[in-house]
Amino acid sequence: MSKKINIKDTLINNGIVLLLAVLVVYVSINVPAFRSFANLKNLAINAAPRVIVALGVSGCLITKGTDLSAGRMVGLAGCLAGIMLQKPDAPGKIWPNFPQLNVFLVLLICMAVCSVFGLINGIVVAYLNVPAFIGTLGMQMIVYGIALVVTNAVPIGGYRADFTTVTQGNVAGIPFLFIYLVIAAAIIWFVYNYTRHGKYMYAIGGNESAAEVSGVNVKKTKIIIYVTAACLYAIAGFLFSGKSGGASVNLGMSYELEAIAACTIGGVSVNGGIGRVSGVIIGVAVFELLKSSLQFLGVNTNYQFIAQGIVIVVAIALDIRKYIAKK
Amino acid sequence: MAEYRLEMHGISKSFPGVKALDNVNLSVRPGTVHALMGENGAGKSTLMKCLFGIYKMDEGEVLVDGQKMNISNPDEALHHGLAMVHQELQPVPDRTIAENMYLGRYPLKSYGPLKVIDHKTMNEETVKWLENVKMPFDPKRKLGELSISQMQSVEIAKAVSQDARLIILDEPTSSLTENEVEALFSIVRDLKSRGVSFVYISHKMAEIRQIADDITIMRDGTYVGSWNMNDISDNEIVKQMVGRELTNVYPPLDNEPGEILMEVKGYTSISDRSFQDCSFKLRRGEILGFGGLVGAQRTELMEAVFGIRHIKSGEIFLNGKQISIKCPHDAIKNGIGMITEDRRGTGILGCLSIADNVSIASLDNYLEAGVKLNTKKIEELVQDNVGKLSIKTPSSKELIRNLSGGNQQKVIISRWLANNPDVLIMDEPTRGIDVGAKYEIYQIMIELAKQGKGIIMISSEMPELLGVSNRIMVMCNKRITGELSGEEATQENVMKYATQF
């Protein structure tokens, strides 16, 4: 009897993943191109920077926060990287007199800029006790505004070859993007599981008051989380920008929502305290598969948004259901 | 007119495993204040909840003005003229006084088919009722702008406006200043003279003397007796409240207190309503009990020592050296640990494993190269504690919320054993724990004392307080009122100091 209920619960709790698995199988059978190596590689390349964004958001979610400025920070970092790495003779070069810096130095600059915004997010959430939802919503608009000011809303293109190489190249058939993903995921996995910071993060998400009483420096931990997240968005923005060979202020728009949805699908609880790196990766993969499947089925892009929206709501409803069932 | 406004006869109520009320009686005369007294857990609140139909009584009958009543919810009780002003008020602070007075029963007026709230009538009526309790306030003021005592008066006015003839006041003065208490009493006296009866639940002897006409005493869920206040002395009241045999068994208290380890001087809360000018000393190897009745501010004082709450003035010395504690982190760095009263709220990390729960306060000791945690060593620590405290669990990976209360408490104790503080504050360490686990926790406490640590135990259970403390500080009404040790540490003496104000 109890086993039957368990099977039912398992089915419901993993409903989204199972449903998408069915969809993927269906599409694979009916549209052979979908299961081609080229498409899978394409999927991996698309997913890689999104996983990096989702990893950043996951820390905020685990501590019962969120980060709605993620997408706009991706956009700002992408634009900044693009501006700094335009060819000297690119038409309409935005900063004509900017020196030609090393591509990795540019990445570091982008990370530094975003980490300032992350620091502000962290201070607003930890010290001013502004709900993360509101604090980072404000930051979303601020960062977008800054991106508009910096770019003057002009699209950026004409990238240097080294920028294109580090973001679009591959070694032995493995795209660099995929390698970056593995490195980022490995570092975050280590932080979440083998460092004091990681343990503190889960403790804050599990019970913030209890964590504080146990001597956890809650404010410092939260600030580190928001700064780390911002650095990850900067990396993702850099990669997105280079990958597509151009950037505009609209880069990254609503990526935070995709990231939150992916995290939730992957088992990061919006009630805090629970979430694994593997889950985040699976969540993004599932979400990307959904998008790709719908494309291959020839579903109109507009309808794809409707489908994604439904998936987000259902995923969170199922997550909350798990939590309530355990009471 | 019936002789009694309210009669409760032979009320019994059981919860799974406990008999909370056993054949309890209460009779309140019209136009009097009837004190209801008893220790923590004597069953006063349960009795009132039975009266209001919040709990369904197993046996017994309730008569209001001589009529037998069958009350199944607070609304019905109000209909029969019974109202309760809760210990913790539950108003809507951001709405006006009038809206709070008429919450759920707003006067309406009609514009054709449309019914809208009649603000004019509501505000006028509110002014009338507020005058009744001598509160000349603008009914359009936000309730939240009033002080707690004024809100209480609004609650009383509300009860009277609903034609209540019996009002229950549950610890009404626990967070009031002296002037506010006086204001409350004048309202109570005035209403009394107009025939309203009160049941007055309080721990404060002096207040009871001032305001009450009759008294009923309860002990461990049973009815002890009722007296006219003129016929019973303070000492007799205390004796009747605690008059039980001490039968519980405690492990031998064979630890030996040494030199002074910690000293707290003149601790005064930033809030006037909390602890004032509290000083005490804790010795090495000593278990120092903190007794008192609920609301005496013992928890608040200890949470301030640990840095969870803030002080206006006061000093703390550890090993003769003055230290500064502004947050729990500071306290822990100085070697002070605390097991809080609210295990669920500030103790367990519910969705994390036992291993994480044990190690969280001592991760600093397990860093390799300043970064990586030595998970193997942490696991050893956890296994060590699970064994030593005989925590019953399938594995250290089990989530703490799946354990029983007693085992959860042992995990929290392990957290502090791992952290190895010099001073360990334990607030109600055995609350909600079965007898066997209680005994084990007492053993751990004595063992820690033998290792030279100083233990502070807040306990609201008299036998436990007397059974495992080397010395007892008693608090009442925000202050430390007594220090007892050896022969002096008796139930009567503790209760005497605990009801001093």
Image: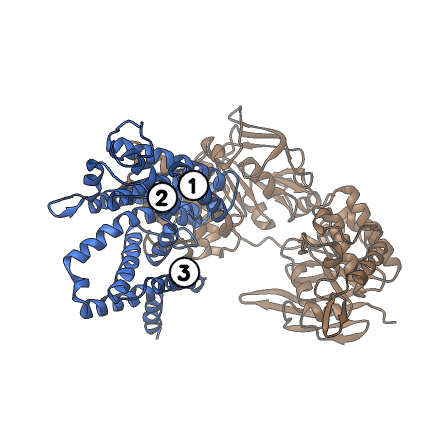
Using the image, name the chain to which the residue with label 1 belongs: A
Q: Residues within 10 Å of mark 2 (few under 14, many from 20)?
A: many
- Looking at marks 3 and 1 on the same chain, the residue that comes earlier in the sequence is marked by 1
| Cα distance between the residues tagged 3 and 1 | 27 Å
- In x, y percent, where is residue B28? 80, 64
Amino acid at pointer 1: Val
- In x, y percent, where is residue B117? 74, 65
Circle number at residue A143: 1
Q: Residues within 10 Å of mark 3 (few under 14, many from 20)?
A: many
Residue B40 is left or right of residue B444, and the answer is right
Q: Which residue is mark 2?
A: A75
Chain coloured blue in the rendered structure: A
Using the image, name the chain to which the residue with label 3 belongs: A
User: Nearer the viewer's eye, disc 3 or disc 2?
Assistant: 2
| Cα distance between the residues tagged 1 and 2 | 9 Å
Residue farthest to the left? Answer: A172
Residue A269: which quarter of the image?
A: bottom left
What residue lies at 22% left-to-right and 36% top-to-bottom? A160
| Cα distance between the residues tagged 3 and 2 | 26 Å
Identify the image quadrant of the N terminus of chain A.
Answer: bottom left
Which sits in the foreground, A244 or B245?
A244
Residue B179 is left or right of residue B246, and the answer is right
Q: Which residue is mark 3?
A: A316
Amino acid at pointer 3: Ile
Q: Colour of chain B?
A: brown
